[in-house]
Amino acid sequence: MRTETQVLKSKIEEVKNIPTLPGVVSKITSMIHDPHVSTEKLGGIISKDQVLSAKVLKLVNSPFYGFPGRISSVSHALVLLGFNVIKGMLISASVFDMMSRAMVGLWEHSLGCATVAGIIGRKLNETDSEEVFIAGLLHDIGKVMIKVTLLEDFEAVLQAAKEEGAYMREVEERIVGVNHAGIARWVAAKWNLPANIAEPMTCHHDPTRAKDYARRAAMVHLADLLIQAVGFGDSGSPFVPPLHPRTLPLLGVDLDFIETVLLELEENMDSLSEFSLEV
């Protein structure tokens, strides 16, 4: 007999509302393992979905992403950023196409978290900081999946969190049976996201839960709290959660570092507020 959690997991995994993932992303995921497939061919496959490829290029060329110069094609992006980052962007663009219409506040929060995570990664000279940006973009995908599959529960969670002044993840565990980070782990596994993106994405509330990428998880955790603290977007939580005590030691920084991150974020706020994935 299947448990309620197994039933919920199956329901989440069977969601068909996330566009493009079954087609373009699945195809390039299988192609990437072929050593004879060129980045030009992969880029060509992605570019056949003109709207999606345009959104990926708009995202990678956004002023707050932090990549120097303009990237003119998906193939160019693949060469410079690597498959993992582009796959994450494909997923992000697909998910946010839905979120930007139905969950504007969460879309803004996720974009803001990604921006701050990218700033932190670059300041700390993190290898492939673009992947930290992607983890920030996708860190709340579990909330999206709850709304898509369990709309009444999602609305009940929001109301209870607000009325009780409780952490959203605690209310989710009570009402849904699992919190959004747990659901994100299912989604990351289903989409075959690599651990260097999946762990920071799914361990953003407790970086010490990450097996191999605790430092990156700490970056996303700090970014999540900072973007909530400045009031950009709406994560659904009524207040900013406390900083995990291991965050600053994992990053090797102090409170002065946080001030420098906030100063750079302030310089990006106009671009962040005006950004849209509409093409």
Image (cartoon, rainbow, N blue to C red):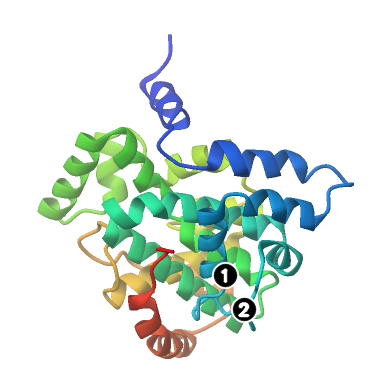
Q: Nearer the viewer, residue 45 or 114?
A: 45
Residue ID at (36%, 21%): 4
Residue ID at (42%, 32%): 15
Residue ID at (71%, 53%): 44
Residue 81 falls in which quadrant of the image?
Answer: bottom right
Helix, strand or loop under label 2: loop
- Please rate how many residues cluster around mark 2, counting C-alpha atoms within 10 Å: few if below 14, some from 14 to 19, many from 20: some
One can see residue 203 in this view: no
> Quick one: label 2 or label 1, which is nearer the N terminus?
1
Q: Position of residue 217 (x, y in %)?
A: 54, 61
Residue beneath label 2, please? 67
Residue ID at (45%, 88%): 264
| Residue 58 in the image: above or below residue 48 | below
| Residue 248 in the image: above or below residue 237 | below
Residue beneath label 1, please? 60
Q: Nearer the viewer, residue 194 or 98?
A: 98
Circles 2 and 1 in contact, beta carbons < 8 Å = yes
Would residue 159 appear left or right of 48 to someone viewing this image? left
